Amino acid sequence: RVWYFIIALNVMLVVFNYFLSAGSVVQGVDLTHQHVLFSIPFIGFSGKPPFFVPKPLIFSVESITFMITQGLRNFAIAMLAIPIPFTTHPGLMGIAFKGMGVSDRFAYAIDLSFRFLPSVTRDFGTTLDAQRARGFEIDKLSGGIFSKIAKLAPMVVPVVIGSVVGAEDIINAMELRCFGMGKRSWLTVLHPRLVDRVVITLTLAAFFAITLLNILGNFYSAGFLHVLHVQGIPQFLIP
């Protein structure tokens, strides 16, 4: 379900960005010889009043290739960020990063970051139940927006103060254990499985192979892998 959401969000962002930018393409691409496929009536921006003028929205090989490139870039970013929180237990997050060779400070900072939001959510739920027991109904707030924000003080203040007190408790506990004075040990040790080693090996191999091809292939001039058009578009896509 997470990837369905990522795919839908990515498509919406790319399409909306294309329409909002009136089909503009990344700078540095020669558009004097655009390979136009079709165009539709649209509204563009102008530097003079009324600032909105009729302007055709052009769909060309260059613009569609740019949209695909944007989508792939967003997917690449999502593939780096999404798998970690959805495949690793929050209580093992710091141990996992420590096992990857990062410092104790960085690993513990990541561990606390992943625990912060669930802790605040738990405190908010507890505070909400306590305030409802006292007759405070968040669904029945009246008045304007600023009045409603002011009336939320019985909810916001305890949660904020609780978060600050919790942070101070963590700081005191770390100071009592002389955190940062030497190498730390963890109560739990994670051992990679065979499938983990295979995935890591294949990922590193793909990364180095793509980087090597990008450097030695010389895509942008006349290298032995120069199979692309000067615009960065495969020849078979050119109408």
Image (tube, grey):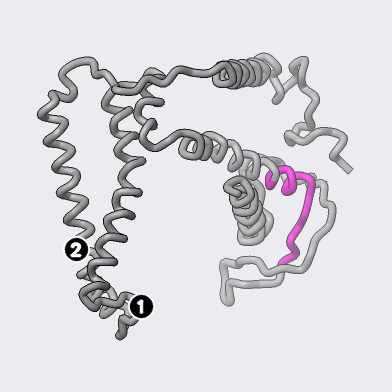
Q: Amino acid at mark 1?
A: Asp
Residue at 32%, 78% (x, y): give it.
145
Image coordinates for residue 173, horizontal then vertical, percent: 14, 33
Quadrant containing the C terminus in the rendered view: top right
SS category of the residue bearing label 2: helix
State the mark number for residue 3: none
Image coordinates for residue 179, horizontal then vertical, percent: 17, 25
Name the residue carrying label 1.
139
Quarter of the figure with residue 128:
bottom left
Name the residue carrying label 2.
157
Which residues lie in the magenta part?
55-67
Distance, label 1 to label 2, CA atoms, is 18 Å
- Is there any visible trace of residue 211 in the rendered image? no
Relative placement, left or right, of 84 versus 161 is: right
10 Å crowding of disc 2: few (<14), some (14-19), many (20+): few
Image coordinates for residue 53, horizontal then vertical, percent: 66, 72
SS category of the residue bearing label 1: helix
10 Å crowding of disc 1: few (<14), some (14-19), many (20+): few
Q: Choose the circle earlier in sequence order: 1 or 2.
A: 1
Quarter of the figure with residue 228:
top right
